[in-house]
Image (cartoon, rainbow, N blue to C red):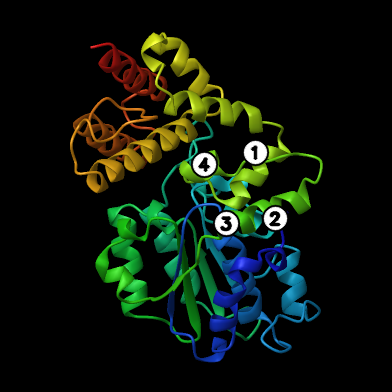
Amino acid sequence: MIEFQELSWLRPVWNKVSSRWKSLPHGILISGNSGIGKGQLALELVRLLLCTEPNKHQACGQCASCQLLENSVHPDLHVLVPEAKIDSQPEPIRRHASRYFMSEKGASSTRKPSRVISVDSVRWLSDALATKSGQAGPKVSLIMPADRLNSNSMNALLKLLEEPTADTYLILVSARPYRLAATIRSRCIQLECPTPDPQVVRSWLGDRHPKISIDVSPFARCGFGPLQINGIVAAGHQNLFQGLIEKLRGPLLARDNPLLLAQECSAIDIPTALRILQHLALAQIRRYATEAGSLGAVGGQTTFSSRESCIQAFLEIGRFLIHTGGAVDEQLFLEDICTRICMKRKS
């Protein structure tokens, strides 16, 4: 697990929030790009809020509350995470979050893990926050990613923000805060986490992987943060990702069989491949906007054949990723996108 202390680019945000931790409001929204360490920052804040003997705006790590948290049994930490995302979370988050899973509430063992945070989970959270503190201190709820709340669960959360129980904190973490209702955002103080400069990322990755030469640029173009790049390199998938990214940006996609291209995308995980395509579409849209907006103005490496196809793909992929697990099959959707990319280049 990557510790918060290793993420130097988040130090200014931490200094800002930790210096006023005793006067923080009930609702806190931590936002920023994916893969930059928002979850680690949130967990560090949880430690500080629950610690009974903080030392210079840091959790002591030794008191009973800190020990309960590190052993994943703190009664006053309540975590909401989609069941489908639990494997990517650190241990203190996993066990605390499992209390609110449908599988723990008697749901069918054959149901698929949910990709959203359900209204039932928020209602169970509300009931838990209304009870007496187990450690005679504050109660803290961590919700991440908060943009995985559906409309019903957002309404239930809004009630918690509007009528907070005493000495209770709701910490929301999201890379897409615009998906949250404006009424929720307006009731939270927002902590915006900066994306580190490429040279900072190179240095940080170089320290962790001194024997591997890492080109950060293609990953950064596709929205990957340093923690995500680190995971890719640690798994030995760096060349696989770089090869696919360069192919998707290259001028020779028209020669590809769309089904084979979809297979290459599937090899790195379909949702991840779709996010890469969406980032490439957004980058191309921005190029059209800044280079006179004409079809001929955007030259060089492009993925989509026109501004209209960029916009269409960006919107369709965004809608699909929000509602992944619906009636449309992931593989079929990916094959459709790949077919349109290849065929429009031929036309």
Residue at coordinates 60% horizontally, 51% vertically from top-left? 226
Q: Are marks 3 and 2 in contact (CB under 8 Å)?
A: no
Which residue, given by chain and number where applicable, does mark 4 sit on? Answer: 84
Query: Distance between the Cα atoms at labels 3 and 1?
Result: 25 Å
Q: Badge 2 local density, few (<14 within 10 Å), some, or many (20+)?
A: few
Where is mark 2, residue-wise? 203
The local crowd at label 4, few if under 14, some if 14 to 19, many if 20 or more residues have their Cα within 10 Å, is few
Instruction: State the separation of the CA atoms marked 4 and 2.
Output: 32 Å
* Residue 324 image point, x, y percent: 38, 35
Q: Is residue 290 above or below residue 139?
A: above
Instruction: Give the spatial CA distance, label 3 vs label 2.
Output: 34 Å
Residue hosting label 3: 97
Pick whichever of labels 1 and 2 is earlier in the sequence.
Answer: 2
| Placement of the C terminus among the 4 image quadrants | top left
**Mark 3 secondary-structure assignment:** helix
Residue 103 seen in the figure: no
The picture places residue 196, in percent across and down from the top left corner, at 56, 60
The disc placed on residue 232 is 1
- Secondary structure of residue under mark 2: helix
Circle 1: is it few (<14), some (14-19), or many (20+) Cα within 10 Å?
A: some
197 shown above or below 62:
above
Mark 1 and mark 2 residues within 8 Å of each other at the beta carbon? no
Disc 3 or 2, which lies upstream in sequence? 3
Sooner in the amino-acid sequence: mark 1 or mark 4: 4
